[in-house]
Image (tube, rainbow, N blue to C red):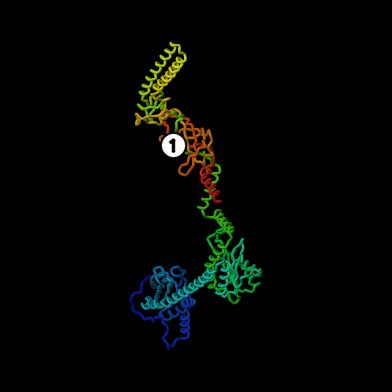
């Protein structure tokens, strides 16, 4: 039955306290108090503490003290009273109830009672104390006595934790001092030697050696109190074998082995036998997260040697492990920094290869698979290589219409952009001056004819011939004037489009003979002029096919064929272009000369990777040629 003790009357119970000075104490009690005062841990103090508690508690017939890791356990009895006698069933049941409730528990049975009090500190359960009493109802003072008595154990726990913290602080301080000494050295060799010497002095070792794994086995790189140790080959070989023994077993080896630990220590025993060191400690260390067969990959080991009368304790091992864990990373960083460049490249490739073929690193494997797939794809994938350039649509024939003679513009019914038929009047010259000149010349013809007739009548043959020749000259001039008057109407030479010329704003202006008035192009024959960049002109050949896309007609591509490659270059915005002519294989009524767009010339099949990168590669070649 679980119950809480209430206010009841009963015999008073003295508090657990040391006897006052001058009081007579039995020899056994004095021994218990001395043991309690000298104890440094709960395990040492528990038997004396429980015995004193039970002897000072009237009616107590049994007791037990349970202790373990706070809130973790396992919680086991560390002291029983009477000594050598386990707790009764009633006491065990009360203890279980108190653990579950984390509160005092009282059980009664057959005139006896059991009182259990959880041992709490900072809200955590450290254990439990329980007493069995020869009374059905425990006196209230017993619970108070238990609480006062646990105060002594609280002090021991605090003292224990303080000692643990101080030991940890001392270890950290020592490790940081060793790390600082290692960092102070500029080179790997000096840092390793300084670390080994400082470890030997700090831990009172005869010799400390540092080794790194090289080609599958340990290579001793530094030894305390010895800058040059190459001549001591037997010693170095023995130390390296001891390091390999620890590396193979992936654990710290303390020689001589104590307890029932199963370890192979043959090489350690050989080192101790051959070179006179009675105590050896070998510590492997791991630098990074690399793994071999699922286990952390070791990078080296430290070997500590002492005389036989100074074996390595657990505290020594913990201190060495902390110092090695910190300093080994510094040594590895300095060692890597001093590697030759080819060694760095080799190690990097080996690292990448190991990650690529080893476990995990799924992203790296997928990336490599993607790169391999892309390489295979681009090694066989081809496509059509098209050279593009700005294009202008021009008429295949461009007929120039000029002024037939010097005169004045009388009319201009047509202008640029108009479609005309053959014979349509484009413009008309003013014929009035020609008509007047024609009348004058016609009078001269008649005059010279009469003169010739009069000379013949007077038998003046010479004069008659002259007059007749003058008449013929005047007649020729008259015929020329008639032809000019007939050509006063400037007509279109064929069906087409007026591509230039606008005289509507120049009526009455004088023009000179041969002056260009209009340009006419046919509507059923076109050519295309392209501007191809000089870096791509080498791929263009006469007869290659292509397509033209006009800005005004983006919904249709027009087929073209290269007909001429001219050596004429055009510079624009810092780049040079070659002028190429192509014929338009298919014309349409919607096309007009002067339309602009982009043409693409199919130059053949090439690898896709070449098509996408040849511009950059060509630029890189030119840059390299310029600067290298």
Residue 172: image location, x then y, percent = 49, 71
Q: Is residue 62 visible?
A: no
- Compare residues 540 and 487 and report the one nearer the observer: 487
Residue of label 1: 597
Crowdedness near tag 1: few (<14), some (14–19) or many (≥20) residues, C-alpha within 10 Å: some
- Compare residues 255 and 419 and report the one nearer the observer: 419
- Compare residues 220 and 43 and report the one nearer the observer: 220
Is 579 situated above or below 240?
above
Q: Report the number of numbered marks.
A: 1
Residue 477: image location, x then y, percent = 42, 20
Q: Secondary structure at mark 1?
A: strand
Residue 79: image location, x then y, percent = 47, 75
Q: At 55% from the left edge and 48% from the top edge, which residue is drawn?
A: 625
**Image quadrant where one finds the N terminus:** bottom left
Q: Is residue 141 visible?
A: yes
Is 116 situated above or below 342?
below
- Compare residues 436 and 223 and report the one nearer the observer: 436
Residue 215: image location, x then y, percent = 61, 61
Q: Quadrant of residue 25?
A: bottom left
Is 215 situated above or below 154?
above
């Amino acid at each position: 039955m679980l119950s809480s003790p209430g206010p009841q009357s009963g015999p008073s119970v003295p508090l657990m306290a040391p006897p006052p000075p001058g009081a007579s104490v039995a020899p056994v009690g004095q021994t218990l108090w001395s043991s309690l005062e000298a104890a440094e841990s709960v395990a040492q103090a528990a038997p004396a503490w429980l015995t004193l508690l039970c002897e000072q508690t009237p009616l107590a017939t049994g007791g037990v003290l349970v202790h373990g890791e706070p809130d973790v356990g396992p919680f086991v009895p560390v002291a029983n009273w009477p000594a050598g006698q386990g707790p009764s069933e009633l006491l065990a049941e009360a203890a279980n109830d108190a653990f579950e409730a984390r509160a005092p528990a009282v059980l009664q049975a057959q005139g006896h009672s059991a009182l259990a009090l959880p041992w709490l500190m900072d809200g955590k359960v450290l254990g439990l104390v329980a007493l069995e009493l020869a009374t059905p109802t425990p006196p209230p003072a017993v619970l108070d006595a238990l609480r006062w008595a646990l105060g002594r154990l609280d002090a021991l726990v605090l003292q224990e934790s303080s000692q643990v913290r101080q030991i940890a602080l001392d270890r950290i301080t020592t490790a940081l001092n060793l790390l600082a000494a290692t960092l102070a050295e500029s080179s790997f060799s000096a840092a390793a030697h300084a670390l080994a010497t400082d470890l030997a002095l700090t831990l009172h070792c005869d010799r400390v050696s540092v080794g790194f794994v090289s080609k599958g086995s340990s290579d001793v790189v530094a030894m305390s109190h010895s800058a040059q140790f190459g001549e001591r080959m037997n010693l170095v070989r023995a130390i390296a074998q001891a390091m390999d023994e620890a590396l193979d077993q992936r654990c710290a080896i303390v020689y001589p082995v104590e307890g029932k630990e199963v370890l192979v220590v043959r090489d350690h025993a050989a080192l101790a036998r051959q070179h006179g060191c009675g105590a050896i400690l070998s510590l492997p260390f791991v630098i990074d997260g690399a793994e071999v067969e699922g286990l952390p990959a070791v990078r080296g080991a430290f070997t500590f040697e002492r005389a036989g009368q100074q074996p390595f304790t657990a505290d020594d091992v913990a201190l060495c492990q902390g110092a090695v864990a910190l300093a080994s990373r510094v040594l590895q960083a300095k060692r890597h920094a001093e590697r030759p460049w080819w060694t760095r490249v080799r190690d990097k490739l080996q690292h990448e290869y190991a990650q690529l073929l080893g476990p995990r690193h799924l992203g790296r494997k997928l990336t490599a698979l993607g790169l391999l797939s892309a390489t295979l794809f681009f090694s066989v994938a081809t496509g059509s290589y098209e050279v593009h350039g700005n294009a202008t649509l021009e008429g295949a024939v461009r007929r120039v219409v000029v002024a037939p003679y010097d005169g004045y513009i009388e009319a201009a019914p047509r202008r640029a952009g108009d479609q005309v038929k053959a014979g349509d009047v484009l413009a008309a010259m003013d014929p009035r001056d020609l008509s007047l000149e024609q009348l004058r010349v016609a009078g001269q013809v008649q005059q010279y004819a009469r003169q010739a007739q009069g000379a013949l009548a007077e038998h003046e043959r010479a004069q008659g011939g002259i007059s007749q020749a003058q008449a013929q000259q005047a007649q020729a001039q008259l015929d020329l004037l008639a032809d000019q008057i007939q050509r006063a109407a400037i007509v279109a030479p064929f069906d087409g489009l007026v591509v230039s010329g606008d005289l509507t704003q120049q009526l009455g202006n004088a023009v000179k003979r041969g002056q260009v008035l209009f340009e006419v192009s046919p509507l059923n024959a076109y050519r295309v002029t392209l501007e191809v960049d000089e870096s791509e002109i080498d791929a263009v050949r006469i007869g290659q096919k292509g397509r033209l896309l006009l800005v005004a007609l983006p919904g249709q591509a027009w087929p073209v064929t290269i007909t001429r490659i001219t050596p004429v270059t055009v510079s624009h915005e810092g780049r040079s272009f070659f002028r190429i002519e192509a014929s338009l294989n298919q014309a349409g009524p919607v096309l007009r000369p002067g339309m602009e767009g982009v043409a693409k010339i199919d130059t053949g099949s090439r690898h896709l990777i070449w098509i996408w990168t040849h511009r950059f590669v060509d630029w890189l070649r030119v840059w390299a040629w310029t600067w290298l």
